[in-house]
Amino acid sequence: MKRYIFILIIFSFTGIFRSQYNEQLYKKALSDIYQDPDNSQKITQLMLKNEKNPDNLIKLYKLMSHSYISKREFDKSLDWVLKMKELSKNVTNPEQKVKILNATSIQYQQMGLNSKTLEILDESYQICSQLPDGKFRTYYLGLNSALRGLVYKSQDNNELALEKLLIGLEYLKKVGNYDNAIANSSVFLYNIGYCYFYLKRYNEAEKYFRQSAEVARSVKAESLEAFAYKGLSENFTALGKHQEAIELLKKSVNLSKKVGDLVLSEGIYKGFSDNYLALQDWNNYEVYNKLYIETKFAREQSELASLNKSIDVLNQENNRKIEEQKSRLKIILFIIIAISSAVFIWFLIKFISHKKRNKLLSEKLNQINKITT
């Protein structure tokens, strides 16, 4: 890995290559999103140096966005989504449009902007469903369904969430490890586990949490494995298996050291706190309850900052749409006035013409009357 980065650095100084994009490095950065997002960002930043190809830029912007989402730094993730959206103005390739819309929907879903997420998913589905059969279409239809499931899960509609997540999982099973599909399968399995957990179907929840951990381990996605153990520990806590839950949380801590995911850390500390409270281990309870409160506050502050930023972006978007509507209305009004004026002038000309004609006819009639008399 270090050898590849060293080569890229040399090329960036010598100018031998105008682009540092490399498919092998891209795959390495992609695989690091869930286990070492900082390293993923370093690799991606190097590949972005002097990159001009729109297809490569979209892939790399999306990668940067997802790596920040992995760290729950949504305001920074949003910056990269906005770069993609700006680039999308000149994109005509439907597959690239789907990629951009997918990344945008993930961003809004993570920030809890559910109506906006569903709106973008609808647009993405319309494009994706018209693409020819293949791994791309299958993969992104699966993501589309699963993201809807995450929205419904956040709205406590766990039955509908399960339906959509299971459909998404079936799609991803068909594409192997296309574009990080296996790691995403672990995410889906984890959320399916929580849907069953919230429905108090603890046996099914345990099954899917274990599957999530197994799948994450198969692709060395350590943070996803940590999430799975955190979910499984919460399942054990509900069943009164407090010591087993604590052991799983310790595994989560070891696996999540590189990630810095505030949501994961908050969940782990809360799990420790709840279980030590149940065991009446007051010293450990106080330690972890304090960590839980501090981490929760940090997570809320981070989300608040990103939400404010997203509101500004949405306001700008709405203002732009309003200005576009005003421009359209002005054009329509101009056309209506122009047509109305043309019709009025036409009628006026016709009226004047008829008046002149009637006057001539009247004069001729008078002349005829004079002759006959």
Image (tube, rainbow, N blue to C red):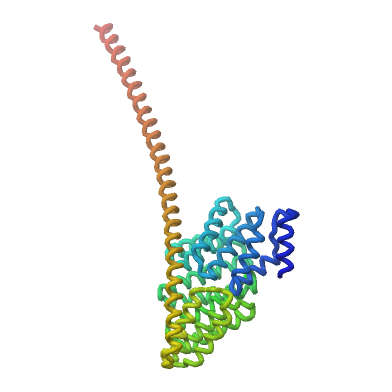
In the foreground, 72 or 364: 72
106 to the left or right of 139: left
Where's the C terminus, which quadrant? top left
Q: Quadrant of the N terminus?
A: bottom right
Q: Which residue is drawn at 74% across and 68% down?
A: 3
> Residue 40 location in percent, x, y?
62, 68
Residue in the foreground of this view, choosing between 291 and 198: 291
Q: In which quarter of the image is residue 360?
A: top left
Residue 181 percent across, percent down from the top left: 61, 72
Residue nearer the viewer, 321 or 148: 321
Residue beneath the point at 43% across and 87% down: 285
Farthest residue, direction left: 373
Question: Going by the image, does 90 lie left or right of 267?
Answer: right
How many discs mark residues in the rendered view? Answer: 0
Residue 337, how many percent across, how many down? 37, 35
Quarter of the view holding residue 171: bottom right
Q: Nearer the viewer, residue 153 or 53?
A: 53
Image spot of residue 195 (x, y percent): 46, 80
Residue 112, placed above or below residue 219? above
